[in-house]
């Protein structure tokens, strides 16, 4: 009974979906009656959450970029106005970026048909919770779009493409080697984070899992990100990325890599994201969770992850030339440091509660323990400004 001709917006989210999006849209726009239905205006939604969970942050980011480039070319081919609809979450692992950097790092031409983006979860309150905030946020979006259209970012040079493609492929393999192919990963994840407890709490709009008995692939993106943020390892946002960049960066191509950082907003935004993520990460807090909650035979797994985190921070600083994390955002750094002081007791309280709940088993259902757990989860999420 809907009279309004509703716009069709195909969603491409997993790595395979993003890579296949040009073929799908070419076939769709080749249908005469469909082109008549859309009347020269096509929406396409680019998903961020599942692609990052599937292949890691770097591979997902490059796949999203290439997909958008190809879709812009196809829209020109069929003389259709394309509006890309960005399905971002609030966290880095779900595509979250400062608005200006997110918009300006898009491929040239991708804003010609307008710009759509989701704001969800805690980001709605942070950006639009008060009239002044809403005006400021809309002003940031508008100014970034105008800037990107008047002074579009450069199209990547061929040598940039070759290097980022190699980095993305290596990043995907690094990420999947840990998350998909290491048989110890899932057992470690289940005990080292509050992932199991998140499913019991009324914090999300949908079930935590698509399949109750499934593994990581069945876990929705929000609890996947949420669980790692709670322990301050924030794993999905950085795992495998800096090792991939270091493995591709050689003395022969160092000049090109430096050029990418100074001249290409897309690449620079990836490293800028990591800068912010690394400031939110705290290996000491993660270690405290492991000491209390992880059995002896799995403790080495967390130690290896924290070792990679520390290596990654050093590698990033070597590329940026900064002496410390978030050197170029002193206000953001100070804000996180102030909140970190309040977060620390919440983390240790959560560790104690997790230990008690797991030892109590079914007896912990609907008790003050779980209510207290909910308070710690909400408090840490607000302090981190990341739920998922």
Image (cartoon, rainbow, N blue to C red):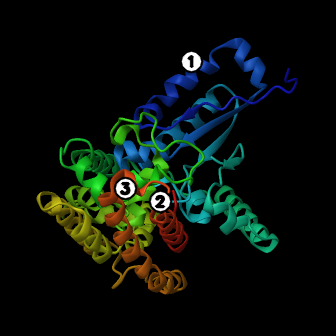
On the rendered structure, is 71 left or right of 305? right
On the rendered structure, is 225 left or right of 78? left
Measure the C-alpha gap from mark 1 to mark 2.
Answer: 33 Å
In the depicted structure, whether residue 256 falls above or below residue 18: below
State which tag comes first along the sequence, 3 or 2.
2
SS type, badge 1 = helix
Please tell me how many numbered marks the rendered image carries. Answer: 3
Q: Nearer the viewer, residue 262 or 288?
A: 288
Circle 3 Cα neighbour tier, 10 Å, few/some/many (<14 / 14–19 / ≥20) = many
Measured as percent of width and height from the top left, residue 257 is found at 32, 62
- Marker disc for residue 236: 3
Residue 270 shows in the view = yes
The residue located at (69%, 65%) in the rendering is: 125
Q: Where is mark 2, residue-wise?
A: 92
Measured as percent of width and height from the top left, residue 47 is found at 53, 42
In the depicted structure, whether residue 301 falls above or below residue 27: below
Residue 109 shows in the view = no
In the depicted structure, whether residue 190 falls above or below residue 274: above
Q: Where is mark 1, residue-wise?
A: 27
SS type, badge 2 = helix
State which tag comes first along the sequence, 1 or 3.
1
């Amino acid at each position: 009974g809907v009279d309004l001709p509703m716009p069709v917006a195909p969603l491409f989210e997993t790595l395979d979906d993003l890579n296949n999006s040009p073929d799908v849209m070419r076939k769709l726009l080749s249908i005469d009656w469909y082109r008549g239905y859309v009347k020269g205006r096509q929406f396409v939604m680019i998903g961020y959450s599942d692609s990052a969970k599937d292949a890691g942050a770097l591979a997902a980011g490059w796949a999203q970029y290439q997909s958008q480039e190809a879709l812009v070319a196809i829209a020109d081919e069929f003389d259709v106005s394309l509006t890309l609809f960005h399905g971002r979450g609030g966290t880095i692992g779900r595509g979250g970026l400062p608005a200006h950097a997110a918009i300006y790092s898009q491929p040239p031409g991708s804003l010609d048909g307008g710009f759509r983006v989701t704001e969800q979860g805690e980001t709605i309150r942070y950006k639009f919770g008060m009239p002044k905030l809403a005006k400021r946020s809309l002003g940031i979006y508008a100014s970034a779009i105008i800037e990107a259209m008047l002074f579009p970012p450069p199209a990547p040079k061929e040598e940039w493409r070759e290097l980022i493609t190699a980095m993305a492929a290596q990043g995907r393999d690094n990420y999947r080697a840990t998350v998909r192919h290491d048989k110890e990963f899932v057992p470690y994840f289940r005990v080292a984070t509050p992932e199991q407890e998140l499913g019991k709490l009324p914090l999300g709009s949908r079930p935590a899992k698509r399949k109750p008995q499934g593994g990581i692939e069945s876990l929705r993106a929000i609890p996947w990100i949420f669980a790692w943020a709670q322990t301050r390892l924030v794993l999905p946002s950085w795992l495998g990325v800096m090792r991939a960049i270091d493995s591709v960066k050689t003395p022969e191509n160092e000049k090109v890599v430096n050029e990418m950082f100074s001249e290409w907003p897309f690449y620079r935004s990836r490293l800028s994201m990591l800068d912010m993520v690394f400031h939110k990460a705290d290996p000491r807090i993660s270690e405290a969770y492991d000491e209390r909650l992880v059995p002896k035979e799995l403790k080495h797994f967390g130690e290896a992850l924290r070792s990679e985190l520390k290596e990654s921070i050093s590698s990033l600083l070597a590329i940026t030339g900064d002496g410390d994390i978030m050197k170029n955002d002193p206000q953001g750094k100070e804000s996180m440091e102030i909140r970190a002081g309040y977060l620390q007791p919440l983390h240790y309280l959560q560790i104690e509660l997790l230990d008690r709940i797991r030892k109590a088993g079914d007896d912990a259902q609907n008790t003050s323990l779980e209510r207290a757990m909910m308070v710690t989860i909400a408090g840490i999420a607000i302090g981190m400004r990341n739920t998922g």
